[in-house]
Amino acid sequence: MNPYRNQFIYQVFVRNYSEEGTFNALTRDLDRIQALGTDILYLLPIHPIGIQGRKGAYGSPYAIRDYVGISEDLGTLDDFKQLLEETHRRGMRLMMDIVFHHTAPDHPWVKEHPEFYHWKDGHLTNKIGDWTDIADFEFENNPLLIEKLTQVLEYWVKLGVDGFRFDVAPMIPAAFYDIAFPRIKALNPQLTLLAESVDPGFLSFLRFNGYTCLSDGEVFRYFDMEYDYDNQEKFLGYLKGESSLEDLRNRYRLQEIIYPVNYVKARNVENHDNARIRFYTQSYDKTLNWLGYVFFAKGIAFLHFGVETGTDHLSYLFEKDPVDWGKLDQHLVRWITGLAKMKRAPIFAQNDHYAIHSHTKDVLHFDYENDQEIRVGIFNVGLESGVINVKYPEGKYVHSVTGERVEVRHGVIALSKEPIIFSIPKR
């Protein structure tokens, strides 16, 4: 059993969460976020952004020039503390983004500790060509760098932060995690640690060029959960019409055999680095089925703020580009709320008796089974018509979210434009 599989992460970029773009504006909306069923509020980096090499008018929050500072446009440290306190008061946890692979090129350490950085031909540089607004760390033979970064984590843990999402976690060497994580867990054993893993193609590129890149299995030694990017190529391939849904199903099956039995993947279909799911589907109903998948598939659910509006526009990372909350879609809100409530059922936390079923139609079909029930999820991501064959007892069942009737008859279930989720009680 892994209780993270009963939970739901809500990702927020404070700058573009609202017109105001501040901690205080986010604090005022915590009741709405809590009402969705959110367990963990995850904030993109909140630190001062570098000026040298800045992209766009505002710059990337991942080009950081002060790890213990607060970006002035977001508010003050006291404002952040108030957000943290109000998040806790509502029973949610706050996780912050940590960027320890690189800094902005005008971070003070560049001058104070040039040995911390990656240099080439006498020039400060980075390992990834399009990351032109950052300067990469060089961890090898740099124990002082590891110590200073560990102290950054300790600062935020002592302030009351509940966890960290690590940017490009595989590019940070195990030597750092071996030292830093025992120290921060000594301060708070209940810390939540989420790794942004990388897709297989990027991992191969990094290793070919001689750069550190931990595998997902290695990352699981240190983190509670990690991104689902090992499936990203097949997921996007399906959405773009370049690969089949069965290719993606087989990737889900592979996870069941290559990871620890209690592994947790952050199931998401969009985030700040990837286009909105609605952008790919151009369909309200397909989008809803993918959101159903996010909550039903084994793992922790992960939503990017604004998905509740049904928008196909992803906020620009380097500019002021707030979500239009005037377009909040109450039907989507009801579904997300119902899915989050459903996910708290104990069956979703179990390690075993989780099946991924294949069909000739473009339908994702999963089920969980224990001594009390079989929990079925059918997600019509291809908006197929007709029926699919199933091997469940005949009968009329109650939809886990809508309360409507779901019928299994003559070994088939009629497909719907909306997710089909129901429980078959064991007698």
Image (cartoon, rainbow, N blue to C red):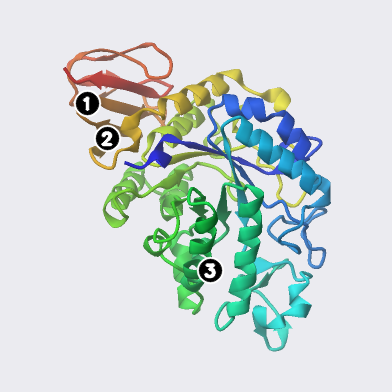
For the residue marked with disc 1, what is the amino acid? Asn
- Name the element at disc 2: loop
Quarter of the image where one finds residue 124? bottom right
Few, some or many residues within 10 Å of mark 1 (<14, 14–19, 20+): few
- Where in the figure is residue 387, as x and y percent of width and height? 28, 22
- The single residue placed furthest to the front in the displayed view is 186
Q: Are marks 1 and 3 in contact (CB under 8 Å)?
A: no
Task: Give yes or no for contact between labels 2 and 1 (Cβ–Cβ under 8 Å).
Answer: yes
The residue shown at (23%, 38%) is 353
Label 2 belongs to which residue?
Answer: 359
Residue 131 appears at what percent x and percent y? 66, 66
Label disc, if present, on residue 26 of the rendered structure? none
Q: Does the rendering let one see residue 324?
A: no
From the top left corner, tell me how far across and down residue 367 is, in percent: 28, 32
- State the CA–CA distance, disc 2 to disc 1: 8 Å
Amino acid at circle 3: Ile
Which of 326 and 162 lies nearest the eye of the viewer?
A: 162
In the rendered image, which residue does mark 3 sit on?
Answer: 172
Closer to the camera: disc 3 or disc 2? Answer: 3
State which tag comes first along the sequence, 2 or 1: 2
Q: Secondary structure at mark 1?
A: strand
Taking the image as shown, residue 395 lies to the left or right of residue 71, namely left
Q: Where is mark 1, residue-wise?
A: 389
Element under disc 3: loop
